[in-house]
Image: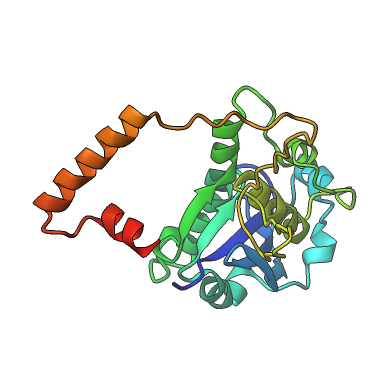
Amino acid sequence: MAHIRQVVLDTETTGLEPAQGHRIIEIGCVELIGRRITGNHFHYYLNPDRDIDEGAQEVHGLTVEFLSDKPRFEDVVEDFLAFVKGAELIIHNAPFDVGFINTELGRLGKRHGRIEDHATVCDTLALARQLHPGQKNNLDALCKRYDIDNSQRELHGALLDAEILADVYLAMTGGQATLSLETHQQGVEGPVEAVIRLDGARPPLRVIRASAAEVSAHDERIAVIDKESGGRCLWRQAEAAQ
């Protein structure tokens, strides 16, 4: 069975609404294959050819000056679509990023379609709300809940956020667990139940043996089964082999 390929994706933008002409200024993607981070990633800063809202700049710290010599979306779109092709996209608050990506694709005409034509989408915010209803489910809150280190995250950055989201997603959906017991099994995925060990001082369990009447009734029943099956009763065969 082929391993599932997933791409954890995040964007940074000039503002909140693509309908108001806001643009993507950073794309970060991290590849997972078989629920393991491969180290393969896609990352670009992009020149938006417009100003950045003050509130957005306070979040990600990117400036027009820094982005002025960076490629534009149309310069990287082919490589981007090739990277995500056929994958499941893992995105936190997916409608936001998908809306911006589809707006950018629409600016280039109809030839690229929509991102959903190239990949499927999983919204981890919707997943988190199902798992933790009524609680904060932003990325910082999930990092705290799942004990994931995000100490490097002074400002938002698309690639860093994608890397953090990959860890959060794996934790939310079962993690990458390695069970090491006497058999040294490796790479066991999913939640691992605790091993319950009985107290050594506990008295032995009581063994209740069948009475003579119960043994006789059992033998009679086995005889009927053996006769009806033409001598193929497995219980009789096991007794004969002892």
Viewer-side residue, 11 vs 143: 143
For image coordinates 69% across by 51% down, the residue present is: 165
- Left or right? Give the position of 18 relative to 117: right
Asked whether 84 or 105 is in front, the reply is: 84
Q: What quarter of the picture does the C terminus occupy? A: bottom left
Residue found farthest to the front: 212
Residue 200 seen by the camera: yes
Whether residue 33 sits left or right of residue 52 in the image: it is left
Residue for point 78% across, 58% down: 160
Lateral position of residue 90 relative to residue 241, left or right: right
Report x, y in % for residue 153.
85, 50
Q: Is residue 137 above or below residue 86?
A: above
Q: Quadrant of the N terminus?
A: bottom left
| Quadrant in which residue 65 is drawn | bottom right
Q: Vertically, is 92 above or below 158?
A: above
Left or right of 141, for residue 233:
left
Q: How many marks?
A: 0
